[in-house]
Amino acid sequence: MTKSMPKPEFIFKPVHESHVQASIICSKKLKIHFRVRSGGHDYEGLSYVSQMETPFVLIDLWKLKQINVDIEDNSAWVQAGATTGELYYRIAEKSKVHGFPAGLCSTVGIGGHITGGGYGTLMRKYGLSTDNVLDARIVDANGQLLNRTAMGEDLFWAIRGGGGGSFGVILAWKIKLVPVPETLTLFTITKTLEQDAGFKILSKWQQVVDKLVEDLGIRVLFRNTGNKTVTTTYRGEFLGEKGTLMEVMNQCFPELGLTQEDCIEMSWIETVVNNAGFTTRPPPPLEILLQPSSPYGRPYFKAKSDFVTEPIPVLGLKGMFERMIEEDASFLIWKPYGGMMAKIPESEIPFPHRNGTIFKIHYFTKWSGNGNGADDKHMEWIRELYSYMTPYVSSNPRQAYVNYRDLDIGQNKKNDSEDNFRRAQIWGAKYFKNNFNRLVKIKSKVDPENLFRHEQSIPSLPIRSSSS
């Protein structure tokens, strides 16, 4: 953070659930604003920076990281401060044929990750992290510690995908473990612009990727590699052996040219390490998932998201690549949907991006600097690319992923303003579509004083006086 960035006056690191209860009760009584952090990966820093009010307190859940895996019950309780890497490691300690569908980055705090959805390479088979939540422990606006039965199904619905920091402090999730085979297969194939002349491979990917068998997911990574060029990398993960994968690819996507030599068989936990960015040779020990630092470092960055419901035509792809060439550190990821993601109804949980979505776009640019003005050109670039993509992505509303928080969509600074409520409806529709209204009703019931708030938290309905 820079000197001008709002910082917490006090950082509180509870070591017991009762400490969180006490902190909420005290903050409410003293009318002190607070933020809650489980991993600190919020894209706009809203879990540890407040542009709304100062002074404020940061409740850091880092020390609440207990994980209890029950293989016989196919479940686990995981506290909010544990990372996805720690969870994966503890599951693999107990079983080679159990896993959990969550994110690729191993240093994300599980508490916040699941509140927005949480997805990764297993989502076409098993859905989101939050689709696999069985119970939760949460401290509400009155400082009460509630489980699923005590909080009721409305609040339990809201916290599974309604975004973090709006309804209470998540202390722990009970998750459902999912079966994985002993052998999975990964592949990575990179194409230059010249090798995919006319975008025939990329166009075919768009046509088939959401219709492939649920055991297979193929991401596409676009990266500016310098020298005025962009590479396109296809990264696939298959729940099975490479012989079966080859049969699927030869039938459905032969244009990619996958060969047996491109395929690497490994266990599920080894794919986790690989996907987390730890790709050194020889492979690092699994304990690397327990380290708190990310292999990607801590750059300045800006990210955005889109959902695509119709294949992007060649003209649109050409313009996208032209703009990527202009930005040295431009990076895009296309993440496939379909499979289980298309089978779960939009209203099942607050996360609405389901049937009809072919893939999601993750826009990303990073840079080094002191943050004082050096970021202007990079911010301008990503906003211009986002604007350019408008005709090629979802509309009415143009959807966005709440875990890729984007304050460009609409700021939320004054928590009692009716104008602010109208602006919240704009980003609310993009993140949650028709589920936003239900989220607001639940918020108004469980937190009418808007104790849990940040720049894009779910708003409470404006309280009107009885005389009006």
Image: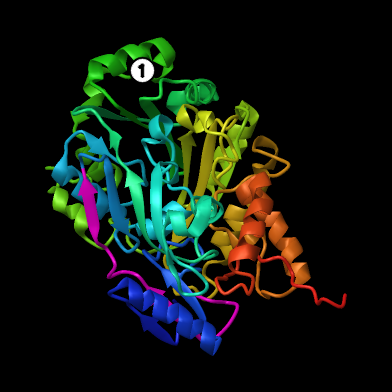
Colour mode? rainbow
| Depth order, front residue of 410/152 | 152
Report the span colored magenta: 49-70
**Residue 227 lies in quadrant:** top left
Position in image of residue 176 (x %, y %): 33, 42
* Residue 282 higher or lower than 156, as above or below: above
Residue lying at 19% horizontally and 50% vertically, measured from the top left = 90
Q: Is residue 56 located in the magenta-colored stretch of the structure?
A: yes
Q: Is residue 321 located in the magenta-colored stretch of the structure?
A: no
Position in image of residue 296 (x %, y %): 32, 56
Residue lying at 63% horizontally and 45% vertically, measured from the top left = 399
Tell me if 350 is positioned left or right of 282 in this view: right
Q: Is mark 1 on a helix, strand or loop?
A: loop
Q: Quadrant of the image for the C terminus? A: bottom right
* Residue 303 higher or lower than 393, as above or below: below
Position in image of residue 463 (x %, y %): 74, 72
Q: Quadrant of the image for the N terminus? A: bottom left
Can the viewer see residue 39? yes
The kind of residue on which mark 1 rests is Gly
Of all residues shown, which one is farthest toward the right? 468
The residue beneath circle 1 is: 257
